[in-house]
Every structure is written in C-alpha cells, then in structure tokens.
Amino acid sequence: MTIKLYCFGESGNAYKAALPLELSGLAWEAAYVDFFNGASRTEEFLEINVMGEVPALVDGDLTLTQSGAIQAYISEKSGKFAGETPEEEREVLRWVLWDNHKLSSQAGMTRFLMNFLPENKRPQEVIAFSQGRLRNAYKTLNAALEGRDWLVGNSPTNADFSCCGYLFYPEPFGFDRTAWPHIDAWLSRIEALPGYKHPYDLMPGSPADRA
Amino acid sequence: MTIKLYCFGESGNAYKAALPLELSGLAWEAAYVDFFNGASRTEEFLEINVMGEVPALVDGDLTLTQSGAIQAYISEKSGKFAGETPEEEREVLRWVLWDNHKLSSQAGMTRFLMNFLPENKRPQEVIAFSQGRLRNAYKTLNAALEGRDWLVGNSPTNADFSCCGYLFYPEPFGFDRTAWPHIDAWLSRIEALPGYKHPYDLMPGSPADRA
C-alpha cells in the first residue's frame, strides 16, 4: 500500500512531512489539496482531518495529521531520522516542539500574510510583531547550529526537517539566510542530501500555477 | 534524586509540565524562575536552557526543556498519561503538537500582551488578530471534546494536560469557558482529578505577589 500525503507546495508544514518521507525511501504519493480554493475546508477533507489542516497522511486504515506526528510515524516505519539513543530521541522531540511553538507557526503565518493575502488586507502591525518574534527564533536556531552539522547527533533528524520547513521558500517573510551564517550552512547541508528536493519540486501546486 | 522543575506560576507552559508531574506521583520540587525580573535571560539560566525558556526539568544529569518533551519524560518514568496503545500514543503526540502550534503558543502570547505589558504598550491589532486565531482553536477543541471525556482514549493523557495549559488562568485573554460547553465540562473533569491544583497553587509566583 502506497502512503498518501495530502499536501500542497506552498505549505511548509506539509514540506516538513514530505521531505523526510522522500528521503526515507518509503513509497509515497502526493494528493493535492487545493488550499487556496478552499479544499481544506470541505466536508470531504474534514472527514480525513477534523482539524482541517494540511498535511494529512493516509496509510491503509491509518490517518494521521500534524507534521511532527507524521514524522514520528515515518521514523517508526523506516527506522530513520528519530535519533540514535533515548537522549537523542528526546532532543529531537524537543526541537520539533520548539519549531511548532516558535518558528514554523510564526513563519508560516507571516509568509501567508505577506504573500497570499490581497495587498490591502495585510495587517502591518501583526506582520512587524511576528517578524520580531521570528528574529528571536532565528537567533536561537543560529546559535544552536554553531559548530554543529545537525541539530541533534551526527546525522539529519526530524529536528532538522521540522525547523527547515519554511526556510527554503522564495516568498519574502523577513528571513534572509545570508544574515544567519550557521543556519545558511545547515540549509546547504540539507540541500546536499541525496534525493533532496525543493518544496515546489516535491509537492504539487505553487504560486507559479496561479500566476 | 528529586526532580526539579524550573517554573513560575504565570507560565501555562510550565503548568503543562507541573500538572502531570504532580498527578503522576513522582517526587518533584519547583525551582522558582523570577521571569518578570529577567531571571530567564541570565547567563546562569541560559546554561540550563539555551532556548531561555521555562519550563526546564532537571533530573540528575538530565536537563530537558519544552513542556511536551518534559511530559513525554514524565510518562517514561511514571508509565502514565502517554496513551495505552501505539494508536493512542500517536494521537497524544498529535494533540500536543496541535496545542503548541495553534493553542498555547497563541494563548500565552495574547495573555501576556493583554495583562503583563504596560497598558500603553499593548499592540491592539496583534491582540485582535490572535484572538481571532484562538477562536478557531477553541472551536476545534470544543468539537473534538463533544461526546468524549478526554481527548484521547478513556483517561487523562498529556493531550489533555497540554491543551488545558492556559485555560484555567483568571487573567482575561479572550477565552470564556462558559461559551464552549464541551471545553467547560472537560476542564471541570480535570479540576476533579485527585490531587489537581490550580496553576497559582501548584507553582511559585503569581500576579498577587506583585500587586
């Protein structure tokens, strides 16, 4: 049975699941959710995921949402990316939670407000405030990567795949990777992994389709 | 060795760790972090937690941060609150991630902006925007609790202890439990658990100390 991932190219949260899925070697296919035309709010999709969120993974009878939970499931099936020891596993979970709390949740929202809302509807005070919070997150991430190749242990884990989720996208949201040298070098290491694909190459749908 | 939890009463994120710690029966003690006087940004504290965040758990040689990672550790040690089956474990993780992403991160920030910033420094547009996002989160949580006692399985888990983190606090941030009947009943069930304590009774520090 091929794993199905409900996703769309613009979603960094979906990318956090799609990237380890692709790199794990598991058989999977993308099911396109036409988010910008409301497909994630239809009754059909809400039956798959009561939270109305992308990504959602379907593997036989199992339906699972939240990128961090999907990553843990991919690790269960593939034996990869979860950390090598109990200590590393805890550290991976810690970074995945941190990312959800401080980085991706803010970055995804800020990028949405700055790029996918009509120009006259963009809440400038909210955007400025979120960019300020995000600077603290970049600072924490950059400091953690100083002198290290990967966030946890000596190889890429779900910690890396979670935190990088929004950082490869070209749409501006206040993140400039050249300003954060340790983040920049780490993103280059991720891009150099065998089989790596950019979000718009890995998942269906991109702003280019709507241009 | 007694587990030490660095925390302060106003922190719902700390409460998410302190509540299952208390209810698990493990021996623990609170170490007060005087957050409002900058104690979480001192070099001494940053050595415990490079992210500068509360809560932080210290158990012998182990230091752990992020409430969700601390919860998982408490479950490891006590055998409680993690779910009874692999399916339930996945569901628990899913809700803990959802809470970090959509509920606690927003509720904590909004409550901070509305109560702990000087009145003339409160960003009204940000507060209104966050309250709008939070309404969607309350809606999702309320719907998930319809016809259920607990978010996952038939007993309280870390899913419940994560999602309730900010919902017992008296300071206004736009949440009115009487407006969400299934959330309200669930909060009452948590309050009725043997050994339950309110955040300001469980952890040191509260607005009353500074009044």
Image (cartoon, coloured by chain):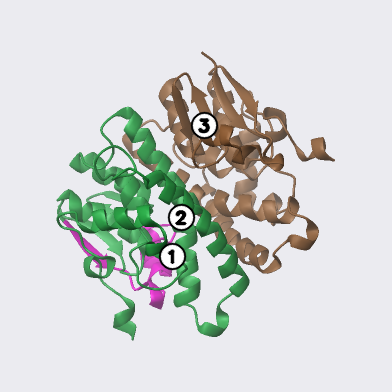
Chain colours: A brown, B green
In screen coordinates, is A57 left or right of A187?
left
> Magenta segment: does it hold B52?
yes
Q: Quadrant of the C terminus of chain A?
A: top right
Disc 1 residue type? Phe
Tell if the residue under mark 3 belongs to the same chain as the one under mark 2.
Answer: no
Percent of width and height locating residue B81: 25, 42
Marks 2 and 1, how far apart at CA: 8 Å
In whole angstroms, how far apart are the C-alphas of marks 3 and 1?
Answer: 28 Å
Q: Secondary structure at mark 3?
A: helix
User: Viewed as shown, does residue B114 lie left or right of B209?
Assistant: right
Report the residue at 62% width, 53% height from top. Answer: A109
Q: Amino acid at mark 2?
A: Tyr
**Do marks 3 and 1 share a chain?**
no
- Local SS, label 2: helix
Closer to the N terminus: mark 2 or mark 1?
Answer: 2
The residue wearing badge 2 is B138
Q: Are marks 3 and 1 in contact (CB under 8 Å)?
A: no
Secondary-structure class at tag 1: loop
Measured from the top left, where is residue B157 in percent x and y? 28, 44
Q: Chain of mark 3?
A: A
* Labelled pair 2, 1 in contact (Cβ < 8 Å): yes
Q: Which residues are magenta?
A: B28-54
Pointers 3 and 2 in contact (C-beta within 8 Å): no
Q: How many other residues sit within 10 Å of disc 1, few (<14), some (14-19) or many (≥20)?
A: many
Residue labelled with disc 1: B175
Residue B3 position within the rendered picture, expressed as x and y whole percent measured from the top left: 20, 54
Q: Residue at x 79, y 62 (%)?
A: A120
Q: Is residue B137 above or below residue A1?
A: below
Task: Report, in whole angstroms, how far the alpha carbon at label 3 lies from the one at label 2.
Answer: 20 Å
- Marking on residue A139: none
Residue ID for mark 3: A48
Identified by mark 3, the residue type is Ile
